[in-house]
Amino acid sequence: MERDEGTLILLVEDDKTLSESLRRGLVESGFSCRCAATFGEAEAALREALPALVLLDMGLPDGDGAELLRHIRRRDAKLPVIITTARSGISDRVGGLENGADDYLVKPFAFEELLARIRVQLRHSERAQLQWTVGDLKIDLPTRTASRGGTPLDLTPREFDLLAYLASLRGETATRQMLQLEVWHVRSAMASMDNVIDVHVSRLRHKLDLSGGAPLLHTVRGVGLVLKEPE
């Protein structure tokens, strides 16, 4: 059987029996799985770790699944979401898809079908992640190139690594410790990379701003850096 080692799936389902059955099946198929039984638990899970995919039940005890879907889309427009629900009406399906779901599966369903749909969405997501877009900034991972407003950016390998890592956070702030570990791969707490990071950030910001477009790289005072579209 094909396995998907470590890929994190957030399962939002308030039926404890079904949730445990799905969780067990996903883990046996090689996925990591975090379960949330309520709107609040799902929000907390999304703040703590971004999953590769969300399985979303529409009927939650403390909120509407449609509102949670809108919350997910405000946070991440590309995160795959599969609705799993007993609501089988055409209007329900159309509404779910128009609200931003990538797929819609009516209960009861065969686990094998769910697994196939998950893998289809993950393959689509993986292809999408070969290229990232932030405003008019485009980052191509296979070729390690970036452009802004159609103009190629002349980046050093480290500058590209820094830009790609910030883009991967999808609007979340990166601390200096995160940059030191994930971009420079320095794990020692005794090694201060502040000056090196500052120099690279300054050069990257200058190159990003050469086009005259709105700033994309922002300093969050006392926290770190964030790459995001102009508001």
Image (cartoon, grey):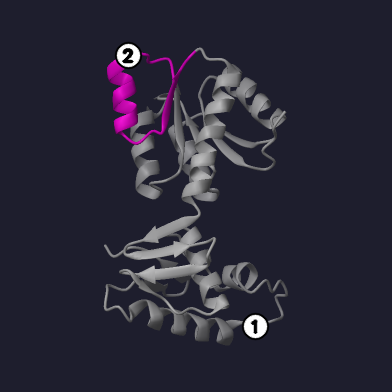
Of the pair 38 and 156, the residue shown nearer to us: 156
Residue 173 at x, y = what percent?
A: 46, 64
Circle 1: element type = loop
Q: Is residue 210 above or below residue 129?
A: below
Residue reaching furthest to the front: 143
Classed neighbour count for the residue bearing mark 2: other residues with Cα under 10 Å, few (<14), some (14–19), many (≥20): few
The location of residue 179, given as percent across then percent down, is 57, 71
CA gap, disc 2 and disc 1:
59 Å
Residue 178, how many percent across, how many down?
58, 67
The residue positioned 60% from the left and 41% from the top of the image is: 8
Residue labelled with disc 2? 89
Q: Badge 1, how many Cα within 10 Å: few under 14, some, many 20+?
A: few
Q: Is residue 33 visible?
A: yes
Residue 192 is labelled as: 1
Q: Is residue 108 left or right of residue 133?
A: right
Q: Determine if the magenta segment contains residue 86.
A: yes
Q: Say which quadrant the N terminus sits in.
A: top right
Span colored in magenta: 85-107
